[in-house]
Amino acid sequence: MKSLILIAGTFLLLSAVCLRGYFALVPPPEPTHNGYLSDILPQSLPEWTVKEHDMAESPESSARISEFLNFDDALFRTYSNGRIHVGVYVAYWSPGKTSYRWAGAHTPDTCWVQNGWSCNERQYSIPFNNKNVAFEPAEFGVYAKEGETQQVYFWHLVGGRAYSYKQNEGHNIFAALIDIKSHGLDLRKEQFFIRLSCNTDIKKLKKMPAFGTILEALATLGLNKKM
């Protein structure tokens, strides 16, 4: 048993050294995102009011968490038309800025629930489209707090592709190996976390031209489905 533990430990150590050497010699990929998120998302919409929020006001990011998330750019806006409210939260990490697991851990499954929201429904990797344009598969959940219910669609894009996984309790000690299997040796791809939350049915929203404008802006960040 001791020899097996020694062999396993040696293997993990050598793997870590090799990966460190690989990352030191091979530069990260070039970013595809340029400019500012605040300029890409619509700043005004006919018959809608637009409100800019500090990132610390979102369920994902308290002031302390925002600091630890260490994103390069971020945006949190609400678009309102009468009683209809749509929240848009986008965070961006340039290549190599943070691990996929760290960025992906701050989903509504974790942060909203820890902020007092209850998850009443959860679906993984569901189809999503804007008109006839297919988006990367979305994560979906229905969350409620103090009489308020929100339908939430969100994406964690890694190198332009949706990164979907069910969050299990605790940490997986083989997480890095799982990510290498899924994404190859280069674990430094560009990342976006995109979240749409709304207090009405998505089918109703998709009939509203202003919502289509929001989706078209988000599509420029890489949401269009990759073949």
Image (tube, rainbow, N blue to C red):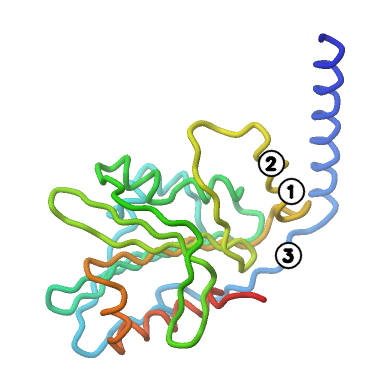
Query: Is 151 placed above or below 51 here?
Result: above
**Which residue ends up furthest to the top in the rendered image?**
2
SS for callout 3: loop
Q: How many marks?
A: 3
Query: Mark 3 = which residue?
Result: 29
- Indicate which disc residue 180 carries: 1
Density class for disc 3 (Cα within 10 Å; few <14, some 14-19, many ≥20) is some
Query: Is 123 placed above or below 49 here?
Result: above
Q: Nearer the viewer, residue 122 or 143?
A: 122
Point 52% across, 67% down: residue: 137
Point 18% across, 74% down: residue: 84
Amino acid on which the number 2 mark rests in the picture: Ala
Amino acid on which the number 3 mark rests in the picture: Pro
Could you tell me if the residues under marks 3 and 2 are in contact, i.e. CB atoms within 8 Å? no
Query: Mark 2 = which residue?
Result: 176
- Indicate which disc residue 95 carries: none
For this view, does 147 lie left or right of residue 132? left
SS for callout 1: helix
Sequence-first disc among 3 and 2? 3
SS for callout 2: helix
Which quadrant of the view contains residue 208? bottom left
Q: Nearer the viewer, mark 3 or mark 2?
A: 2
Could you tell me if the residues under marks 2 and 1 are in contact, i.e. CB atoms within 8 Å? yes
Q: CA distance from mark 3 to mark 2?
A: 19 Å
> Percent position (x, y) of residue 143?
28, 53
Q: CA distance from mark 2 to mark 1?
A: 6 Å
